[in-house]
């Protein structure tokens, strides 16, 4: 009996490792890309065009989230590890250090453009003119007590008008992404932190008590005013057209595709448009990146050509096809800079991240 | 409660039939009530089901049509080099063809809008056409190319012309252009073959289900080939051969527990074992099949065991009594009897496997993959993943594709169940 | 259970010697025969340490029909199933003692049950044909034991066995029908035909007629009578008439003990043990 168990386990082991030997023996002939779900819609279009234009296979792109993508990317060198990771946030020092420890010594950073996060509502309702402070007061779980510096209270506001007399007398009801989403991260960092900084004592906390600062800014209401609507931004758009009272938080590309149903609220006096996000005047926007494993560039077929496609004007230029997918292009000089980075494959150093 | 004796004494002879008749109405009422409840339950579930079908079909049937635009393209020899067909600028030819229809469009921005009426794939179509019809180079040809997804949505009636221009994805100029094309008979809707022959794409008009279909097919083949024999053998061993003791009890409890484990756990297991330990490639049907095998095994084992249990023991005794060895008894008499039940269990397991995305997420099968997989080690996705990815796409035209993909999934499921029922019927007939 | 009853008390023939006391559980009568086919010595059976039968000593002669009778639950089936080791299939069943066949104890560890069961066939209480065609039902045993080499031999065997079981005329033009489509009596004869198709030396029958009507019963009894020319038959029956009609010797079991064994005539006309007499006269039951 024992013998049987041992032999059958050994058999299974040999079988699977046999399969993996034969499949690993044949080197990967397609590019493997992982990472941010925000960059995913752009990277996939580039990949598709690259696949159509060239004789190479179309790259495989997984939407794993920025963090998950980087973990896979930085696990090591070799065909079983991805070649490129997309990211909706810049790589951190500790991530890069970890890459180095795992033998991924040369990582090339490419910025591809910007993404805006919009707060939108149904076209049937009034257009909102919000300040980031209004967003913070409307959505944070705990808000400062007016006239009492340093004190917090559970969020008492029921309508927008209570926060700011200029806002409509509408119930606070906001659909947004869950904490696992990159859009949510960006929203709390850009909009909520920005709004909280309007209170000087909270802004000061950022230096003195970073933990408390984060708790104040990043904790959203749980009393029903903020509603987690799932990762799927389409669902939020759908919900908005059904409940005109409500606001929704999602990526700019979804606004761009659904302008007949929804409108983007002004934030700090700026409406989310291509131009406003591109020139940096719209406050809730973030740069998007991808990272290349230099060691793979010469082993995986098509790497250079893919990078050339991504950094071509036809793709990420002012009128490139990525703009039709909602990517907000970088200024011309910045594009030229990153095109050179890709050509030279200049690796990132720890100093670059200071 | 009637006391028969008392009744007899009081009223002379009371016949049982009278008592029965008295209660009869109540009994029938009860029965009727039960039947009504049953009917209502069936009707409610059927109406939910039909609601689902109706909403999916009404959302999705338009995806089976594709708007095409006819262009008169001049295959200019200055643009196409006969010796290097691949590198010619076909987009330019398409653009020229569009401009020849609307010669008054001159401003750069307007031209861009004009070019946007047809799909970006128009140039690739033209390339394929030219490669096939070399002798047409230098002449003027007519070619039907897919319209852009926004035009497609307009033609299918998803864009309301009455909304203000700024809120439409198609502005008034473009509307006028499209209307002109319609008047000139240069627009038609055709059956969307691309949907069934292409892999994924970020352009809705180019996206197809074929890649995911093949991915599901390969993945399920691996699952079936592994889980049916392994699950069946495990069930037969546990039910017919294993001694009944503490160990087999523990195994039984564990198998039952495994059947209730959330499927993502199997994905994590697959990631740890197949990818990290054995180094199998990511995103391939082989690994997907292995993971889904782990997931479906408990279901198949449990169903197979109850199928085996249902075989009357008199058959086993008959076999043994005539001098069959235990293996012969099981193989010749018990298994054929249990096989229909085991098949049912397998098909339930396979149907579950067909609908899974969570465990596949961990092993990289939730991915954008354009090329149609041609084997067990080509990167691929599966049908539910494709549905999930399309449902998550911003372009409006993917909405109908999502519903259409759900229809394809349901048809796949029906075909699979049909085959299983056919096999089961054949087995039942044979015995 | 053992109490006197006044009904069904036949008048005792005069001049008989006194009967063995009810409390006495030693087997009375002639247990041994000359040149036995099978010989049981001190056979006991435990189901999960609960004793079902114990201390059974009994010879089964060649070409005889031996009947086993007794109240239900007394261990007849249990004993019968010892004879071809069918008890092995029951979880937690322990058999003690010896059963010799051709001088070899069939419970020795080196004995293979497969050939044993080919040698000692069994017909069960409830007809249990395989859910296969009539033809395959008969041919199955011969096929697995390699008794037939080709289709012709198989055909011959199937026809022969069905004829001997008296079923041929009823099924000859529907051999491809499933065995389960026959009537109860026909099914039981099919099972007998299946058993004799492998040409065993001993056939064990456990109440083969209990679910059959009188006509089907008569046919099977006739069949048993014929079969005894070639086979040794051990049959359990709850019908004393049947036992007296078909058997040469009869064994009476009571609460797990073999109470009395002897020629059938003697058991029914002149039992030696009080319990036997109680049973056959219907005073116990
Ligand atoms: N499989 C079994 N497990 C446990 N006890 C059993 C089993 N089969 C029979 N017995 C017990 O053994 C005794 C004898 O049973 P059995 O031989 O079937 O009696 P009979 O055939 O004479 O009616 C009964 O008390 C019965 O409860
Ligand atoms: Mg019995």
Image (tube, rainbow, N blue to C red):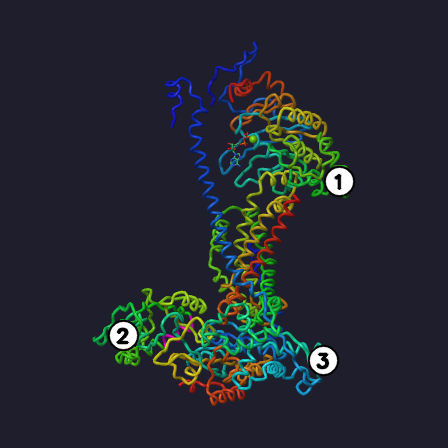
* Quarter placement of the N terminus of chain B: top left
Quadrant hosting residue A239: bottom left
* Up-down relation of residue B286 to residue B417 (above or below): below
* Up-down relation of residue B382 to residue A129 (above or below): above
Residue farthest to the left?
Answer: A148
The x, y position of residue C156, in whole percent, is 77, 37
Which mark's residue is nearer the viewer, 1 or 2?
A: 2
Residue where numbered disc 3 is placed: B136
Cα distance in 3D space between marks 1 and 2 = 100 Å
* Residue C240 visible in rendering: yes
The 10 Å Cα crowd at callout 1, few under 14, some 14 to 19, many 20 or more, is many
CB atoms at circles 1 and 2 under 8 Å apart? no
Whether residue B162 is in magenta: the answer is no
Query: Could you tell me what secondary structure mostly forms the magenta stretch?
Result: helix
In the image, B224 versus C123, the foreground residue is B224
Magenta segment range?
A181-189
Q: Are marks 3 and 2 on the same chain?
A: no
Q: Which mark is residue C236?
A: none
Quadrant hosting residue B62: bottom right
Q: Please, what secondary structure does the residue beneath circle 3 have?
A: helix
Q: Please, what secondary structure does the residue beneath circle 2 have?
A: loop
Residue where numbered disc 1 is placed: C154
Cα distance in 3D space between marks 3 and 2 = 70 Å
In the image, A203 versus A155, the foreground residue is A155
Residue farthest to the right?
Answer: C152
Quadrant hosting residue C148: top right
* Up-down relation of residue C250 to residue A172 (above or below): above
Q: Please, what secondary structure does the residue beneath circle 1 have?
A: helix
């Amino acid at each position: 009996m024992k013998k049987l168990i041992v032999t059958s386990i050994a058999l299974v082991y040999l079988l699977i490792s046999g399969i993996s030997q034969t499949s690993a023996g044949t080197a990967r002939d397609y590019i493997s890309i992982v990472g941010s779900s925000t960059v995913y819609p752009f990277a996939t279009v580039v990949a598709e065009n690259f696949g159509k234009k060239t004789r190479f296979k179309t790259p495989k792109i997984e939407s794993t989230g920025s963090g998950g993508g980087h973990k896979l990317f930085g696990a090591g060198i070799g065909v079983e590890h991805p070649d490129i990771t997309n990211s909706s946030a810049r790589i951190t020092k500790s991530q890069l250090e970890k890459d180095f420890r795992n033998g991924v010594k040369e990582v090339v950073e490419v910025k591809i453009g910007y993404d805006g996060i919009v707060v939108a509502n149904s076209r049937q309702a009034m257009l909102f003119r919000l300040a980031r402070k209004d967003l913070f007061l409307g959505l944070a779980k705990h808000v400062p007590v007016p006239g009492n510096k340093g004190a917090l209270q559970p969020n008492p506001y029921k309508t927008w008008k209570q926060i700011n007399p200029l806002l409509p007398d509408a119930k606070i009801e906001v659909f947004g992404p869950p904490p696992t989403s990159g859009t949510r991260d960006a929203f709390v960092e850009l909009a909520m932190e920005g709004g909280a900084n309007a209170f000087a004592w909270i802004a000061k906390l950022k230096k003195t008590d970073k933990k408390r600062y984060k708790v104040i800014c990043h904790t959203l209401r749980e009393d029903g005013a903020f509603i987690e609507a799932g990762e799927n931004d389409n669902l939020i758009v759908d919900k908005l057209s059904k409940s005109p009272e409500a606001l929704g938080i999602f990526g700019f590309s979804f606004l761009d595709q659904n302008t007949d149903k929804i409108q983007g609220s002004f934030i700090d006096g700026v409406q989310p448009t291509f131009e406003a996000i591109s020139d940096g005047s719209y406050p809730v926007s973030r740069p998007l990146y991808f990272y290349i494993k230099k060691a793979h560039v010469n082993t995986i077929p098509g790497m250079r050509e893919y990078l050339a496609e991504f950094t071509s004007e036809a793709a990420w230029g002012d009128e490139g096809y990525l703009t039709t997918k909602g990517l907000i292009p970088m200024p011309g000089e910045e594009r030229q800079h990153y095109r050179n980075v890709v050509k030279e494959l200049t690796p990132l150093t720890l100093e670059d991240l200071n | 409660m009637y006391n028969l004796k008392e009744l007899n004494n009081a009223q002379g002879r009371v016949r049982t039939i009278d008592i029965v008749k008295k209660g009869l109405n109540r009994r029938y009422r009860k029965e009727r009530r039960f039947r009504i409840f049953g009917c209502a339950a069936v009707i409610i579930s059927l109406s939910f089901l039909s609601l689902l079908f109706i909403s999916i079909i009404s959302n999705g049937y338009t995806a089976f049509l594709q708007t095409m635009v006819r262009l008169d393209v001049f295959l200019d020899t200055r643009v196409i080099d006969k010796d290097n067909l691949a590198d010619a600028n076909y987009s330019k030819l398409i653009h020229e063809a569009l401009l020849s229809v609307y010669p008054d469009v001159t401003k750069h921005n307007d031209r861009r809008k004009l070019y946007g009426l047809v799909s970006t794939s128009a140039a690739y179509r033209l390339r394929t056409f030219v490669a096939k019809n070399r002798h047409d180079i230098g002449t003027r040809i007519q070619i039907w190319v897919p319209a852009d997804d926004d035009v497609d949505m307009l033609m299918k009636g998803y864009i309301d012309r009455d909304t203000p221009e700024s809120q439409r994805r198609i502005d008034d100029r473009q509307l006028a252009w499209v209307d002109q094309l319609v008047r000139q008979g240069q627009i038609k809707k055709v059956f969307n073959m691309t949907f069934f022959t292409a892999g994924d794409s970020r352009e809705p008009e180019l996206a197809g289900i074929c890649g995911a279909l093949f991915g599901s097919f390969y993945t399920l083949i691996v699952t079936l080939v592994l889980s049916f024999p392994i699950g069946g053998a495990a069930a037969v061993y546990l039910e017919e051969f294993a001694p009944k003791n503490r160990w087999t009890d523990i195994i039984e409890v564990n198998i039952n527990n495994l059947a209730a484990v959330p499927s993502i756990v199997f994905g994590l297991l697959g990631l740890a074992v197949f990818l990290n330990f054995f180094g199998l490639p990511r995103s391939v049907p082989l690994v997907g099949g292995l993971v889904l095998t782990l997931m479906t095994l408990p279901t198949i084992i449990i169903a197979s065991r109850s199928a085996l249990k249902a075989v009357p023991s008199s058959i086993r005794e008959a076999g043994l009594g005539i001098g069959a060895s235990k293996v012969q008894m099981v193989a010749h008499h018990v298994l054929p009897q249990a096989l229909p039940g085991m098949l049912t269990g397998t098909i339930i397991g396979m149907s579950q496997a067909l609908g899974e995305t969570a465990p596949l997420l961990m092993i990289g099968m939730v991915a954008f993959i354009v090329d149609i997989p041609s084997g067990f080690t080509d990167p691929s996705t599966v049908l539910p993943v494709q549905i999930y990815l399309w449902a998550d796409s911003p372009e409006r035209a993917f909405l109908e594709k999502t519903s259409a993909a759900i229809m394809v999934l349901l048809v796949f499921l029906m075909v699979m169940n049909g085959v299983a029922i056919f096999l089961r019927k054949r087995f039942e007939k044979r015995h | 259970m053992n109490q006197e009853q006044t009904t069904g008390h036949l008048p005792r023939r005069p001049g008989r010697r006194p009967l063995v006391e009810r409390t006495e559980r030693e087997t009375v009568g002639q247990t041994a025969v000359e040149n036995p086919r099978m010989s049981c010595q001190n056979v006991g059976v435990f189901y999960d340490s609960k004793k079902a039968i114990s201390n059974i000593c009994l010879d089964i002669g060649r070409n005889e029909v031996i009947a086993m009778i007794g109240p239900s639950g007394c261990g007849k089936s249990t004993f019968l199933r010892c004879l071809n080791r069918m008890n092995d299939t029951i979880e937690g069943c322990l058999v003690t003692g010896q059963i010799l066949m051709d001088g070899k104890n069939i419970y020795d560890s080196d004995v293979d049950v497969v050939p044993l069961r080919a040698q000692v066939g069994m017909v069960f209480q409830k007809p249990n044909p395989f859910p296969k065609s009539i033809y395959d039902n008969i041919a199955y045993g011969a096929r697995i034991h390699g008794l037939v080499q080709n289709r012709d031999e198989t055909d011959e065997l199937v026809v022969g066995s069905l004829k001997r079981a008296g079923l041929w005329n009823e099924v000859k033009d529907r051999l491809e029908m499933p065995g389960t489509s026959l009537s109860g009596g026909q099914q039981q004869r099919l099972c007998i035909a299946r058993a004799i198709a492998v040409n065993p030396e001993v056939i064990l029958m456990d109440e083969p007629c209990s679910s059959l009507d009188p006509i089907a019963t008569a046919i099977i009894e006739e069949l048993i009578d014929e079969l005894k020319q070639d086979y040794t038959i051990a049959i359990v029956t709850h019908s004393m008439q049947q036992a007296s009609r078909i058997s040469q010797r009869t064994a009476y079991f009571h609460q797990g003990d073999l109470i009395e064994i002897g020629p059938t005539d003697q058991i029914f006309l002149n039992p030696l043990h009080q319990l036997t007499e109680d049973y056959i006269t219907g005073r116990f039951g």
